[in-house]
Image (spheres, rainbow, N blue to C red):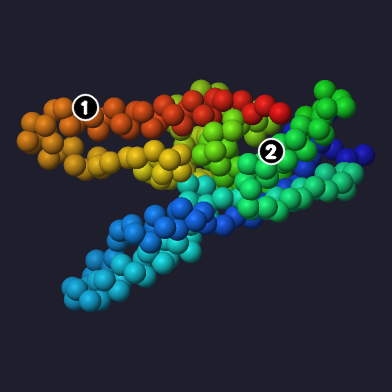
């Protein structure tokens, strides 16, 4: 007799996703200042270092939901061996097909629940899928969400601090198509110059981005 992983009435599904860089993110990174080797002094070498850092950012872009997209998903029901897979550049179609498949697993028996298990799922796959749901604003299925008790940090949506899918607020803003200007380090200068209105605008902008992410996470995916 096989034992369930966490609880009775459980359908265990092994899964994995494959990703690529989005075309708009690639264009964004080609123009972005991704930094340079601070040890360099020669202007020509600094510029070359900037190009290398930019190229490195483009190569790593598929690893993050704010710059990448899912192009393939494969699933296998552990006990039955039944399989599901889809590969397409139409990400909404891909995610909808995946969620329909998972929802159908428990449709015949409403007492059954689906558990997704993958390699580094907590640090990558689950947070990535949730991130793309938020980016596309299609709602997040209940079976993709985890229960942590009180959620007080939006990073928890993507797996928490140990997850590779947690980034800066500016990353999240780009991922959902919002603009985040300025940086927290600039507040000191604003205070020095008594630019109180600018501080309020900057503060409200960060809150607006955070609120939009929370709203999209709270939105339920519906078939």
Which residue is rendered at x = 8% and y = 31% of the image?
A: 194
Q: Nearer the viewer, residue 22 or 213?
A: 22
- Residue 61 in sight: yes
Q: Nearer the viewer, residue 170 or 143?
A: 170
Considering the numbered disc 2 on the image, is that residue within a helix, a strand or a loop? helix
Q: Quadrant of residue 223?
A: top right
Q: Is residue 187 above or below residue 216?
A: below
Considering the numbered disc 1 on the image, is that residue within a helix, a strand or a loop? helix
Between the residue at mark 2 and the residue at mark 1, the CA separation in whole angstroms equals 40 Å
Q: Looking at the image, which residue sits at the far left?
A: 193
Q: Nearer the viewer, residue 27 or 102?
A: 27
As drawn, the label of residue 200 is: 1
> Which residue in the protein does label 2 denote?
96
Q: Is residue 37 left or right of residue 2?
A: left
Which residue is rendered at x = 60% and y = 55% of the image?
A: 19
* Residue 181: % across, % down: 28, 41
For mark 1, does the 10 Å Cα neighbourhood hold few (<14), some (14 to 19), or many (20 or more) residues? few
* Residue 39: % across, % down: 23, 70
As drawn, the label of residue 8 is: none
Do the residues bearing badges 2 and 1 touch, measured as CB atoms within 8 Å?
A: no
Q: Is residue 77 above or below residue 40?
A: above
Q: Is residue 23 left or right of residue 120?
A: left
* First of labels 2, 1 by sequence position: 2
How many numbered marks have been drawn onto this rendered protein structure?
Answer: 2
């Amino acid at each position: 007799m096989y034992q369930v992983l966490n609880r009775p009435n459980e359908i265990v599904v092994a899964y994995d996703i494959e990703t690529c860089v989005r075309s708009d993110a690639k264009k964004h990174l080609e123009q972005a200042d991704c930094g340079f080797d601070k040890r360099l002094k020669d202007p020509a070498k600094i510029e070359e270092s900037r190009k290398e850092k930019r190229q490195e950012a483009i190569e790593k872009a598929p690893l993050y939901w704010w710059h990448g997209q899912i192009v393939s998903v494969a699933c296998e029901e552990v006990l039955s061996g039944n399989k599901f897979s889809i590969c397409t550049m139409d990400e909404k179609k891909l995610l909808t097909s995946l969620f329909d498949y998972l929802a159908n697993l428990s449709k015949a028996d409403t007492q059954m629940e689906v558990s997704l298990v993958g390699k580094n799922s907590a640090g990558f796959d689950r947070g990535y899928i949730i991130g793309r749901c938020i980016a596309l604003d299609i709602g997040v299925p209940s079976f993709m969400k985890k229960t942590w008790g009180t959620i007080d940090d939006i990073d928890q949506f993507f797996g928490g601090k140990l997850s590779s899918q947690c980034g800066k607020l500016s990353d999240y803003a780009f991922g959902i198509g919002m603009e985040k200007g300025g940086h927290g380090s600039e507040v000191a200068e604003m205070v020095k110059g008594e630019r109180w209105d600018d501080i309020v605008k900057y503060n409200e902008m960060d809150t607006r981005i955070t609120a939009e992410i929370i709203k999209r996470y709270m939105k339920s995916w519906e078939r």
